Image: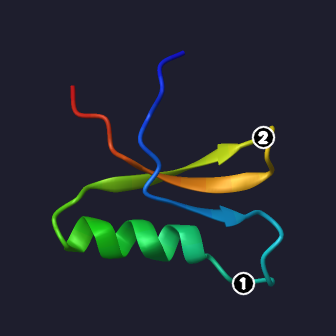
Amino acid sequence: MTAREILADFPAGGPRGSRPAEERAEQLSKAGTPATVVMDLDSDRFLVVPECVS
């Protein structure tokens, strides 16, 4: 596995209906930095990372 840049991270146990990681990824994408959300199971956190460009 290769290391990836983490743009932001949020705990998985946020309030019901709250999606701060997805909201941050959307903000970054609109600002020109395509981003997506992945789950880090080991730390129980959502990570906002740059989208992979093939």
Please tell me whether residue 53 is drawn above or below residue 22 in the rendered image.
Answer: above
Q: Which mark is residue 17?
A: 1
User: In the picture provided, is 37 more to the left or to the right than 18?
Assistant: left
Q: Secondary structure at mark 2?
A: loop
2 and 23: which is toward the camera: 2
Q: Residue furthest top?
A: 1
Mark 2 crowd level (few <14, some 14–19, many ≥20, 10 Å Cα): few
Q: Residue at x 72, y 55 (%)?
A: 45
* First along the sequence among labels 2 and 1: 1
Quadrant assignment, res 33:
bottom left
Residue 9, percent from left and from top:
59, 61
Question: Is residue 43 left or right of 4 when viewed as pictured?
Answer: right
Q: Position of residue 29 (x, y in %)?
A: 26, 65
Decide: is 30 above or below 51: below
Relative to 2, say whether 45 is above or below.
Answer: below
- The quadrant of the rendering that contains the N terminus is top right
- Circle 1 Cα neighbour tier, 10 Å, few/some/many (<14 / 14–19 / ≥20): few
Mark 2 vs mark 1, foreground winner is: 2
* Marks 2/1: CA–CA distance: 20 Å
Q: Amino acid at mark 1?
A: Gly
Give the residue number, with chain letter if any, for mark 2.
41
Residue 2 shown left or right of residue 45 in the figure: left
Answer with the quarter of the image where residue 53 lies.
top left
Residue at figure coordinates x 80%, y 51% from the top left:
44
Q: Secondary structure at mark 1?
A: loop
